[in-house]
Amino acid sequence: MKKRVTIAPYRNQIIFTSLALLMAILFMTIGFWKTVLIVILTGSGYFIGKMQDEKSSISSILASIKAFFER
């Protein structure tokens, strides 16, 4: 019987390598500033979605961002 190969120990390596490859492709095809805009818009979409999922207000999100930068 064959042993099952698991990729769990390499999960983060695979994820971040894939992200780095995607960023490199975006830089080469559409340019630096357009890629930065995509990253910013994606991040803001993530935070808005997180806010909606957790039923939290914008003030609590801003407070958590402020607390992050005050470390």
Image: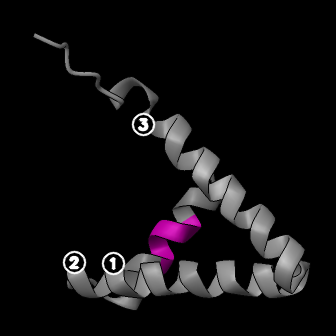
Q: Which residue is labeled 1 in the image?
A: 50
Upstream in sequence: badge 2 or badge 3: 3
Sequence-wise first label, 3 or 1: 3
**Predominant SS along the magenta part:** helix
Q: Quadrant of residue 44?
A: bottom right
The residue stretch that appears in magenta: 62-66
Instruction: Inspect the magenta stretch and tell me whether residue 64 lies in it.
Output: yes
Q: CA distance from mark 2 to mark 3?
A: 27 Å
Asked if marks 1 and 2 touch (Cβ < 8 Å), the reply is yes
Indicate the amino acid at tag 3: Arg
Residue at mark 3:
11
Task: Rate crowding at label 1 as few (under 14), some (14 to 19) or many (20 or more) other CA atoms within 10 Å.
Answer: few
Vertical order, 17 against 54 (above or below): above
> What secondary structure is found at the residue carrying circle 3?
helix
Q: Is residue 36 left or right of residue 20?
A: right
Q: Residue at x 84, y 85 (%)?
A: 30
In the picture of the structure, the residue carrying the numbered disc 2 is 54
